[in-house]
Amino acid sequence: MQMPTPDARVLGRKAEIVDRLRRVLPADAVIDDVAETRAYECDALTAYKCPPLAAVLPANTDEVAAVLKICHELDVPVVPRGSGTSLAGGALPTADCVILGVSKLNDVLETDYDNRFIRVQTGRTNLSVTGAVEEEDFFYAPDPSSQLACAISGNIAMNSGGAHCLKYGVTTNNLLGVTMVMMDGTVVELGGAHLDAPGLDLLGVICGSEGQLGVVTEATLRILRKPEGARPVLMGFDANEVAGACVSDIIKAGVLPVAIEFMDRPCIRACEAFAKAGYPDCEALLIVEVEGSDAEIDHQLRLIMEIAKRHNPVELREAKDADEAGRIWLGRKSAFGAMGQINDYMCLDGTIPVSELPRVLTRIGEMSKEYGLDVANVFHAGDGNMHPLILFDANKEGDLEKCEAMGADILKLCVEVGGCLTGEHGVGIEKRDLMHVQYAPADLEAQMAVKDVFDPNWLLNPAKVFPLDASDARRALDVAAE
Amino acid sequence: MTPTSEDELSAAIKSAKGPLQIRGGGTRGGAGTGTVLDTGGLSGITLYEPGALTLVAGAGTPVAEIEAALAAENQRLAFEPIDHRAILGTTGTPTLGGVAATNASGPRRIQVGAARDFMLGVRYVDGAGNIVKNGGRVMKNVTGYDLVKLMAGSWGQLGVMTEVSLKVLPVPEMIATLRINGLDDAQAVQAMSRALGSPFEITGAAHAPNGPDGHPVTMLRIEGFETQITYRAAELKKLLAAFGDITLETDQDRAAAGWAWVRDAELMKDQPGDIWRFSVKPSDGPALARALGADDILYDWGGGLVWARMPEGTDARASMGGIAGHGTLVRMSDAARGTIPRLHPEPAPVAKITDGLRARFDPRGLFSPVTEPA
Ligand SMILES: Cc1cc2nc3c(=O)[nH]c(=O)nc-3n(C[C@H](O)[C@H](O)[C@H](O)COP(=O)(O)OP(=O)(O)OC[C@H]3O[C@@H](n4cnc5c(N)ncnc54)[C@H](O)[C@@H]3O)c2cc1C
Ligand SMILES: Cc1cc2nc3c(=O)[nH]c(=O)nc-3n(C[C@H](O)[C@H](O)[C@H](O)COP(=O)(O)OP(=O)(O)OC[C@H]3O[C@@H](n4cnc5c(N)ncnc54)[C@H](O)[C@@H]3O)c2cc1C
């Protein structure tokens, strides 16, 4: 993985930069000690590491603005960071950058149940947003599996989703407004507690822009009343195709489950060995969850089971109580841990049209044989977001490279069948160079034009998202200007 | 000009010498200057997969054609696009491109989101003639920047959409409306807030101080299987008992007609004056309405969307005081034309971004800004 050469002029001015930052931030909020900056050398994509020039931990919007103003003036790249759980290397530093961490920005600024929103500082973790409104039986809907750790700022930057997004949508569908600081230090407010914005939907572009357009310091989020109850049903099938057809029949029937999860045989086996959830031994397994009152759940599950029966399931198991529901989810929830137990693995993230599911799984099976690497599949099947886990042996010479090549082939396959390179983890550095597969040069130009407007000198999180060759000229701009 | 393909459209834009007026069905009237660029040739549904809840169609496709195709599979556009022909007195056939370009969304906005939330992908031609695609036809996609949202509600300022892919949803088995008569505006918003804060999945919450029957009416919509309707209606009646008697409308046609009346602000049809549309937080709705002193008021979105019919040429925004939100001038009389901007003015740093984006997407300034009258 290639990164641009660090700017020698910035490296040479480290003392001046740190000194300027110290003048606008409390002493403990500027970290330049080489050993301490190592805490920020990578995110959850640990294969790539690089300590930053310095890290700063501002505590409010004004401090963020002061930091950005200085970095803008001194031409220092800035990499915003939430909790560092990105799996795409989105928060990976460069040696010439300042990491701007929002971990001190974690206050709740306003809760309003009548108008159903909460306003928070963006360093607050996803789960603790729900925590702040739980007493009144409300919740914040997007629920990435990393929700205990990940920050709202990272969720906004990556437009994160979770298991329940089939019904509730992802971050962009639940974000009402932000306070954002532009690279030159200007503070802008986009959206608010009201539902739609006049003019261009800039909020919609900020969401999912991977920390490249501005630093988001506050967010207004939609909160929802918790459903009365939820219950899953587990169904096993003897072919992927059959499970796929069952998914689309459920959707067509007008039931709107909150989650439809799909696991293939290798995944079922691994999870079963690890978590002993009592899963059937079959080719494909679905977990479908619906919400409502008891009677409403009964009704919906009855419909779903009738549909499933038409597909000759090898197993059909409705949770009768919380304990059984827990066991149905247990295997799925431990999927990643289970795979980690038996092997090193690489977790991919791509999306396909649901109708292509059988074809894609068959093709992945063939690739698995061609490359000689096992693959286990878990899917958010309702929305076609797949997470193939490629198993490899990190100690075996050449295995990682083989794994990466196969991963790229699978993602290309996703694009080929009408899907995309990433459904929820983002592009970061991981998929940067694959962007050509999904987008023509004009498509990438249009996106980069947006960055030009927000951050003309390309100082915010610069070498991410766009293939280096596509963004070269722009990143060189401010160097050339000197 | 009426291009029939992206390439033709691209060539036409490249060779354009002056301003262009992008027109779908032209239901917003014939105003505006420049050569008319009719999207009618970019029409037709190219893909529809009911089992995947996705539909892709040319931007010039009439909304009615899409709704008919969906209805055949018992599906629908859940964001309930508004038909403004009644209040604007225009004719024409609303198109998918027009819906996307205006982010037209109806009462269900509060529960499922706006048009932008259902747009999965777009193809468009920018002001330099470049053919661009963004997004795709899958539900989850975080590959690069989300320009789909930028195009949604862009009013044709950034490019001409040629194709839009949409997420669609099944039609529920049944809809029902709970009605409370006689509430004042503040009580109505309280009642709606209480209902919207319940777990009963309200899909419409509107209040008309001067309803179809001439008295105040507060309306709450629930949708789903009959079991859900029965249960939720009973629970809501208990929850809202303090607000007065609640009647339940389960006649499907009458319930649907009621919500079309709200969606299209039909109350204001055939009435004189300018029509404004304000977006505020619901609890601010009644105070805003009081400050406006309008001839007619209609609340949608639980109180957060305030329709106001005002005397011609009134700058209603001046009455907002400290209330956060914004107002759009939807129907403009000659008295308002040229004096009152259609969209709420943006703060300077935001305007700078908007101008920057327009300059990038439309370097020759071919596309009209959104200051034009209806
Ligand atoms: C075990 C595990 C499970 C996961 N499950 C899911 C899942 O189910 N769904 C899902 O979508 N993702 C998942 N992820 C990925 C990751 O958790 C999400 O992308 C998350 O939103 C990142 O949040 P963060 O605070 O850790 O961000 P970081 O990793 O710190 O940063 C992510 C991006 O956000 C930018 N950023 C951070 N703060 C700001 C700011 N203030 N302003 C502007 N940009 C900013 C960064 O520059 C970077 O580009 C998972 C990760 C792990 C490790
Ligand atoms: C705040 C608001 C105000 C509205 N005001 C009106 C109104 O005044 N009149 C009205 O009829 N409806 C209005 N609507 C509703 C909506 O515009 C119509 O219901 C319908 O969607 C218009 O379709 P059309 O094809 O007739 O569009 P048109 O009337 O032809 O165009 C509407 C707008 O969309 C642009 N546009 C159309 N097609 C494309 C395309 N393919 N690519 C890019 N831009 C395109 C046009 O340039 C124009 O700015 C409004 C909606 C909202 C939310």
Image (cartoon, helix red, strand yellow):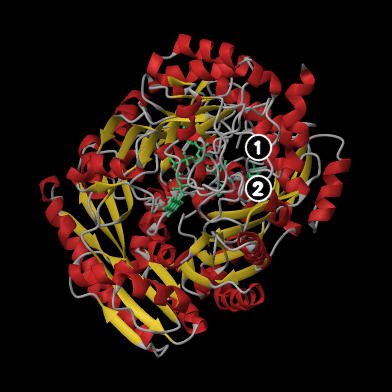
Does residue A75 appear in this view? no
- Percent x, y of residue B297: 36, 36
Instruction: Please indicate whether residue A482 sits to the left or right of residue A152 in the image.
Output: right
Q: Nearer the viewer, residue A378 or B373?
A: A378
In the rendering, which numbered label is found on residue A463?
Answer: 1
Between the C-alphas of marks 1 and 2, the distance is 9 Å
For residue B176, say whether it is visible.
Answer: yes
Using the image, tell me which numbered label, if any, was put on residue B177: none
In the figure, is residue A44 to the left or right of A475?
left
Q: Residue at x 54, y 64 (%)?
A: A393
Q: What subunit carries mark 2? A: A
Eyeballing the image, is A417 above or below B33?
Answer: below
- A270 up-or-down from A122: above or below: below
- For this orientation, the residue located farthest to the top is A23
Say which label, 1 or 2, has the lower sequence index: 2
Element under label 2?
helix
Q: Residues within 10 Å of mark 1 (few under 14, many from 20)?
A: many
- SS at badge 1: loop
| Callout 1 touching callout 2 (CB < 8 Å) | yes
Counting from the top left corner in percent of width and height, residue A179 is at 45, 28
Q: Residue at x 65, y 59 (%)?
A: A401
Indicate the position of residue A90 as horizontal and vertical percent values.
55, 42
Amino acid carrying label 1: it is Ala
Q: Residues within 10 Å of mark 2 (few under 14, many from 20)?
A: many
Mark 2 CB near ligand 1 (8 Å cut): no
Q: Nearer the viewer, residue A350 or B86?
A: A350
Q: B268 left or right of B335?
A: left
Q: Chain of mark 1?
A: A
- Mark 2 lies on residue: A432
Screen quadrant of the C terminus of chain A: top right
